[in-house]
Image (spheres, coloured by chain):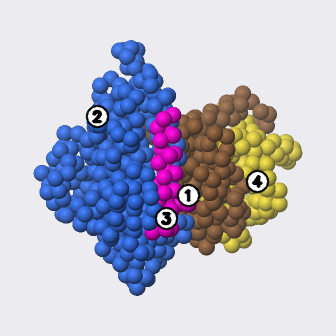
Chain colours: A yellow, B blue, C brown
Amino acid sequence: MRSIRQLTLCAVLTAMALALSYLENLFPLSGAIALPGVKIGLANIVTVFALYVLGPGPAALVLTARCLLGSLFAGNMNALFFSLLGGFCAMGTMMLLRRVRGISVYGVSIGGAAAHNCGQVAAAMVTLGNSAPLYYLPVLLPVGVATGAVTGLVSACLFQALSRTGLHFK
Amino acid sequence: MKKMITAALALCFLCACSQEPAVGELFAMDTIMDFSIYGSQGEAALVQTEELIRELEATLSRTDESSEISKLNAAGSARVSPQTAALLASAQEYGAATAGAFDVTIAPVANAWGFTGEKQRVPGQEELEDLLALVDSSAITVEGDMVTLSPGQMVDLGGIAKGYTSDCVEAVLRQMQVESAMVVLGGNVYAHGEKPGNTPWRVGVRDPQNQEAYVGVLELQDAYAITSGGYQRYFEQDGIVYHHILDPDTGCPAESGLLSVTVVAPANGEGEQGAFTQPGNGAMCDAFSTALFVMGEERALDFWRESGYTFDLVLVTEDGRVVVTEGLAQQFSPEEGTGYVYETVS
Amino acid sequence: MSTRPFPKLRPTVGDVLVGGAVLLLAVLCGLWLRGGGEDGRTLSAVVSIDGAEADRFLLVKEEERIYKSRGYTLHIRVEKSGTGFSVAVTDSDCPGKDCVHTGAISRVGQSVVCLPARLSIQLTGTQDGSVDAVIG
């Protein structure tokens, strides 16, 4: 029964992540900071949640499904490479940071957002075949700190709200 | 640049004999010109040099309708300044010496390709043949200050004007007793004297295939070095690259197996200066760099051996060789890791 | 089943350190990109398409240039800005138009990227330290 519950949860999380990505596109940040790849990264909240509650394996599954379906819906398979590289850089970093004592869900989110930006810049460098996208990093990283803090706040509120449900953490 | 200034400053403290250079930059003759002039006369020499260049541009430009050259082209004959007449006579001399590989009357053909304007195109064979009939600099007559072109002819001094300009800059620097200066006219170099600290100037020869790198470094003092290469200006149509150095025989971009030709010659030195500066080694380097690019490696080296003019060469070939004539063997140091094979010829 | 303790939900000193480390990285990266870049000198713009250099020009006059790649057309304008010049993509028919939103660049190391067109414009200096001048 456990695995079916887990599978269902994964599916729900994937759907939520997709919905959040879509929601985010309605409020682009490019008006304020005009750089490609700048966004709040709401979908990262789902990755944080999945990582904390389900563990790395299922979280990776949710992430892959989200990237694949997201690119498919957008009809832009070029985006798949970007979202996968960004997503997995973020998840890997968050897995590591979570093990460090003295770092809360905020620090984990901030590290994840920054890593996500690094991954996307790397993807852009591979796509373009030169180092030009590197120039965006000094701007994208501070933006990542800010957006990471925001998603960290949302995640903290989420865990706070779920604190009385007897949720198990992995 | 910073390093150079720092090095220069350090040397000042060491020998207390020189100063920071007067540094100037201007855009003229369709290129960027850079000057670093050392010594107490630096600023004054800089001002004079810039004035001189503006004047020359106004006289020799083909795009400025009020220039002597434009008027000559429009009317077919005109009275010109002694300077322009002398430059045209030199152009004829270099044209004859190179058996027409350098020709200032290529202008109508260059026009047809659009290399002088904004829009480039590939002219048809018939059109080229008609225009080629007009290309012959020996048909120009220069009598005193009266110049006459044959009907339909047009001249473009683009292949010699910058070289002549550096001749004139040398004259100004000598007149003002400047001992040390580096003059860069859009990639054409005149090294005046030695660098402060009594070392030669280091001049990189650009790699035609990787324009951020050099094939090697030339150590120069009191010398001209001028490069012509197909990579400097070109356009692409239907996947074919057409560069701007036209072969006066075919009217098409020269396909000689060379990527670039660098001609190095000594400075003119203290000469008798009359009312104006006669075209000298600067003009020669400019004309020969174009002509030898058209000729190709073999003919260029024969010309170097037999022409009687004093100059040396660095040739970069399409098959990946850098050929240096023996006069430069001591002054040229290959750059490591370029992938070129280096040869010295005598 | 092993269960971890409830996650920390309040910001800690560690979080500040993580944020600080990221900002430091950004600053270092910025410094590194600008390394050796001198302002006030003439700059070159290098235009690359599909990873290969497609064009290179000096920023010496105001002008417009047009590049086509992967079915998109990008309009590029060179303009005077302060003592030097800046480059910007003024118009593009690519989706997202991130390249247009990036705005004008005017310093060594800066770049404008258009991912859909696989095009980038980078600014580089024109002087090199080891030699006094370059010919060609």
**Residue B102 picture quarter:** bottom left
Question: In terms of depth relative to the viewer, which is nearer, C39 or A143?
Answer: C39
The three-letter code of the residue at mark 4 reads Ser
Question: In terms of depth relative to the viewer, which is nearer, A62 or B162?
Answer: B162
* Residue range corresponding to the magenta coloring: B47-76
Q: x and y percent of residue A157 in the render?
A: 84, 43
The answer to whether dots 1 and 4 both sit on one chain is no
The three-letter code of the residue at mark 2 reads Glu
In this rendering, the count of numbered labels is 4
The answer to whether dots 2 and 3 both sit on one chain is yes
Around disc 2, counting alpha carbons within 10 Å, would you say few (fewer than 14), some (14 to 19), or many (20 or more)? Answer: few
Residue under pointer 4: A30
Residue under pointer 1: B66
Residue A28 seen in this snapshot: yes
The answer to whether dots 4 and 3 both sit on one chain is no
Please report contact status of discs 2 and 1: CB closer than 8 Å, yes or no: no
The image quadrant where one finds the N terminus of chain A is: bottom right
What whole-number distance in Å separates the C-alpha atoms at marks 1 and 4? 51 Å
* Mark 2 or 1, nearer chain start: 1
Residue C6 in the figure: left or right of residue B175: right
Q: Is residue B26 magenta?
A: no
What whole-number distance in Å separates the C-alpha atoms at marks 1 and 3? 17 Å
**Residue B8 picture quarter:** top left
* Mark 2 or 3, nearer chain start: 3
SS assignment at label 2: loop
Q: x and y percent of residue C103 in the render?
A: 70, 51
The three-letter code of the residue at mark 3 reads Thr
What whole-number distance in Å separates the C-alpha atoms at marks 4 and 3? 42 Å
Residue under pointer 3: B116
